Amino acid sequence: MVTVHPQYITDNTGKKISVVLPLKDFQAIMEELEELEDIRLYDEAKKSNEPSVPLEEAFKMIEEKRKAL
């Protein structure tokens, strides 16, 4: 789990309206979110029951389509 050290910006009444994070904390949060997105996409792909393609073959297919454009 990521530990963050937020600082809050408040309005005149003391209500928190924004957060300031150290860059290191922000980058750690972004990495975690990217990892979670990868996991979500993997789970969706597994549920689809579509046939899988070996990685090398997928790259070949992508390159062929790119060259055709």
Image (cartoon, rainbow, N blue to C red):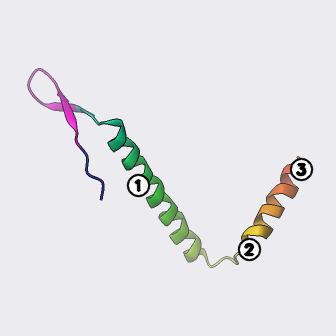
Where are the magenta residues, as a range? 5-17
- Left or right position of 41 against 27: right
Q: Residue furthest top?
A: 12
Identify which amino acid the numbered label 3 is placed on: Lys
Looking at the image, is mark 2 or mark 1 earlier in the sequence? Answer: 1
Residue drawn 51% across and 61% down? 38
Q: Residue at x 21, y 31 (%)?
A: 17
Crowd band around label 2 with a 10 angstrom C-alpha radius: few (<14), some (14–19), many (20+): few
Q: Position of residue 25 (x, y in %)?
A: 33, 43
Disc 2 residue type (three-letter): Pro
| Residue mark closest to the camera, 3 vs 1 | 1
Mark 3 and mark 2 lie on one chain; the one further toward the N terminus is 2
Location of residue 20 with respect to 40 vertically, above or below? above
Could you tell me how far apart the alpha carbons at marks 2 and 1 are, in whole angstroms?
27 Å
Image x and y of residue 45, in percent: 59, 70
Look at the numbered disc 3 and give the secondary structure of its residue. Answer: helix
Q: Secondary structure at mark 1?
A: helix
Vertically, is 27 above or below 18?
below
Residue placed furthest toward the front: 24
At a point 26% along the width and 51% down the height, the residue shown is: 3
Residue 32 numbered tag = 1
Q: For the point 25% across and 46% down, which residue is it?
A: 4
The residue carrying mark 3 is 67
Give the labeled residue for mark 2.
54
Task: Check the image and report above or below for 30 versus 21.
Answer: below
Classify residue 10 by image quadrant: top left
Residue 1 rendering spot, x and y as whole percentages: 30, 59
In the picture, measured across the screen, residue 3 lies left or right of residue 12, that is: right
Residue 9 painted magenta: yes
Asked if residue 6 lies in the magenta stretch, the reply is yes
- Look at label 1 and name its amino acid: Glu
Of callouts 3 and 1, which one flags the residue occurring earlier in the amino acid sequence? 1
